[in-house]
Image (tube, coloured by chain):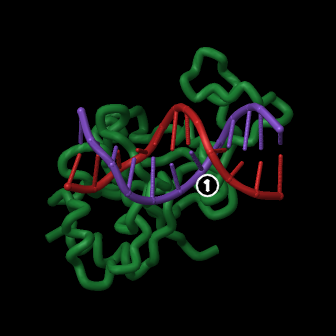
Chain colours: A green, B purple, C red
Amino acid sequence: MTKRYWLMKTEPDVFSFQDLQKRPGKKEHWDGVRNYQARNFMRDGMSVGDEVLFYHSSCDPAGIAGTASIAVAAQSDPTALDPKSKYHDRKASPDKNPWVMVDVKFLREFKRFVTLKELRETPGLENMVVIRRGMRLSIQPVQPEEFAIILKLGET
DNA sequence: GCCAACGTTGGC
DNA sequence: GCCAACGTTGGC
């Protein structure tokens, strides 16, 4: 299977790229996704080895901190079944849990944080999902050409 | 803190 | 199955 590219959003106050780097094995479960479109990307699209732009949202400035990879493909998300979790879904049950998570592994921190403003201004990124008005999807596909352009921005 | 955009919920 | 109300996201 060919490698795919993704963008994954997180609020750095909750879980940042630096937090990921500090985790054992630099890996963490990407749990708590409760949107079907994002779930479908994880479940149907993501494979081990896919590369991810790690996006910080709801902060100033918003933008991409670095890259990660998919370490484990979609698996059942146990937080949906945990009444104590803030991601608990009362409609989910062990034999019918609609929610999945993947494991994400820290790959490389950019030399330079690439802001959303810069994404908007960079030729070749005009069709990126993340710059679309009103776009709230927390997991988005990224074109290989877009990924390459952003890598170059982050490393120079 | 504002508010536009969007997804979800629930009454009918 | 429609759609108004509501809640959330997230840039500014």
* Residue in the foreground of this view, choosing between A8 and A51: A8
Q: Is residue A36 left or right of residue A139?
A: right
* Residue in the foreground of this view, choosing between A47 and A123: A123
Q: Is residue A52 visible?
A: no
SS at circle 1: helix
Q: Is residue A140 left or right of residue A133?
A: right
* Residue in the foreground of this view, choosing between A147 and A86: A86
Residue drawn 25% across the image and 84% down it? A123
Q: Is residue A139 left or right of residue B3?
A: right
Q: Is residue A117 left or right of residue A36?
A: left
Q: Is residue A149 above or below residue A6?
A: below
Residue A19 is situated, as x and y percent measured from the top left of the image, at: 32, 35
Residue drawn 57% across the image and 42% down it? A33
Q: Residue furthest right?
A: A95
Q: Is residue A84 above or below residue A143?
A: above
Splitting the image into 4 quarters, where does residue A90 fall?
top right
Q: Is residue A68 visible?
A: yes
Q: Which residue is mark 1?
A: A42
Placement of the N terminus of chain A among the 4 image quadrants: bottom right
Residue A88 is situated, as x and y percent measured from the top left of the image, at: 63, 26
Name the subunit of mark 1.
A
Residue drawn 29% across the image and 78% down it? A149
- Residues packed near mark 1 inside 10 Å, few (<14), some (14 to 19) or many (20 plus): many
Placement of the C terminus of chain A among the 4 image quadrants: bottom left
What amino acid is found at the position of numbered circle 1 in the picture?
Answer: Met
